[in-house]
Image: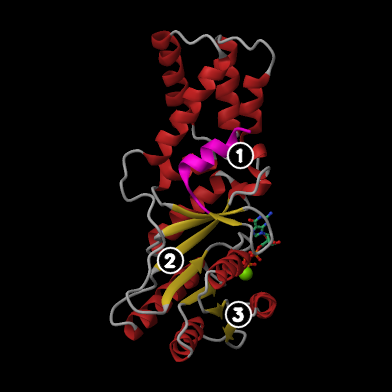
Amino acid sequence: MLKGGFFKNIFQKVDQLFARPQRRIDEDLYEELEEAMIGADLNVHTTLAIIERMRSAVREKGLKDAEDVKDELREALVESLTAGDEGYFSPMKQSPEPPTVYLVVGDNGVGKTTSIAKMAYRYQKAGNKVVLAAADTFRAAAMDQLQIWGDRLNVDVVRGKEGGDPASVVYDAFQRARAVKADYVICDTAGRLHTRHNLMEELRKINRVLMRERGGRPADETLLVLDATTGQNAVSQAKEFKLAVDISGLILAKLDSTAKGGIVVTIKQELGLPIKLIGTGEQPEDMEAFEPHTFVKNIFA
Ligand SMILES: Nc1nc2c(ncn2[C@@H]2O[C@H](COP(=O)(O)OP(=O)(O)OP(=O)(O)O)[C@@H](O)[C@H]2O)c(=O)[nH]1
Ligand SMILES: [Mg+2]
């Protein structure tokens, strides 16, 4: 279920333009809309296309009411999120035989560990057994943080030594999961190493170890976490990760903390990577599967 309220901010400036009393459909409205949409991190290309679509709808359907234009905007947003790519929204892949393995990657501070805790909470609540791999061996504090979540949620955490080999932590977690017949292994990874090159090499090595252990099968999903509050920077990060590792989907964290919800559309347009989950707060239950219709419905209060 969607938490009421948090989406309200996301497109607030755009929404407010329609809410003014006696709002007329005129050049001012289009101009203010354009500015507000771009201000909400919707990319320029999409913004202009949507405004153009509004203009023709107003002409062809003889729309008079600003509320009707808002309906056009809603439809256009849903279409930009769903069009052109049948496989864009797909459920999380499962392994034909347990455990299913998810690798969670992303820059430091974006929300990896918290998102993993939320996933663990979700799967466990649905009756699954989960093992977490604290493979961010670069920082002891990072492993501690996952451990704290594990203790709080009563989920098994497999950890290594500080400075140890992350791939061997993933290996150990996988073996543990097999031994205890767990359904999921979710692996936390480092957000920062001495060099970017090392980080990408490490992620590739983790997948090589998984493939060796799983008869050629890498992680079922390699999920890149992006911080929704960082806008275009998140898009650049994704492009960089995408070049180095095979990202299968995105977790968009901190959507509750931004007024720039247009980033969701920009991600689809510029990256083509499906948003699988969205983060809506700091608590374990603050995560939703991403669904375009519900999302668009909710960004307008
Ligand atoms: N409001 C909000 N805060 C979030 C969300 N997800 C994560 N955070 C917060 O963002 C901060 C960083 O989250 P972490 O999960 O530690 O991020 P990380 O990617 O594991 O960071 P490193 O391990 O340092 O690379 C924490 O204060 C989290 O509580 C979210 O969806 N909403
Ligand atoms: Mg972390």
Quadrant location of the C terminus in the rendered image: top right
Which stretch appears magenta? 289-301
Residue most toward the bottom? 179
Magenta-highlighted stretch: main secondary structure? helix
Disc 1, SS? loop
Q: Is residue 56 above or below residue 138?
A: above
Amino acid at pointer 1? Lys
The residue mark sitting in front, 2 or 3, is 3
Q: Position of residue 50 (x, y in %)?
A: 45, 25
Q: Nearer the viewer, residue 104 or 166?
A: 104
Is disc 1 surrounded by few (<14), some (14 to 19) or many (20+) residues within 10 Å? many
In terms of image quadrants, where is residue 145? bottom right
5 is higher (above) or lower (below) than 44? below
CA gap, disc 1 to disc 2?
25 Å
Q: Which residue is mark 1?
A: 260
Helix, strand, or loop for circle 3? loop
Q: Residue at x 36, y 49 (%)?
A: 88
Q: Is residue 19 above or below residue 211?
A: above
Q: Amino acid at mark 2?
A: Thr
Please say whether residue 10 is one of the residues in the magenta stretch. Answer: no
Q: Residue 46, position in %: x, y?
A: 44, 31
Which circle, 3 or 1, is nearer the viewer? 3
- Mark 2 and mark 3 lie on one chain; the one further toward the N terminus is 3
Residue furthest out toward the front: 127
Mark found first going from the N terminus, 1 or 2: 2
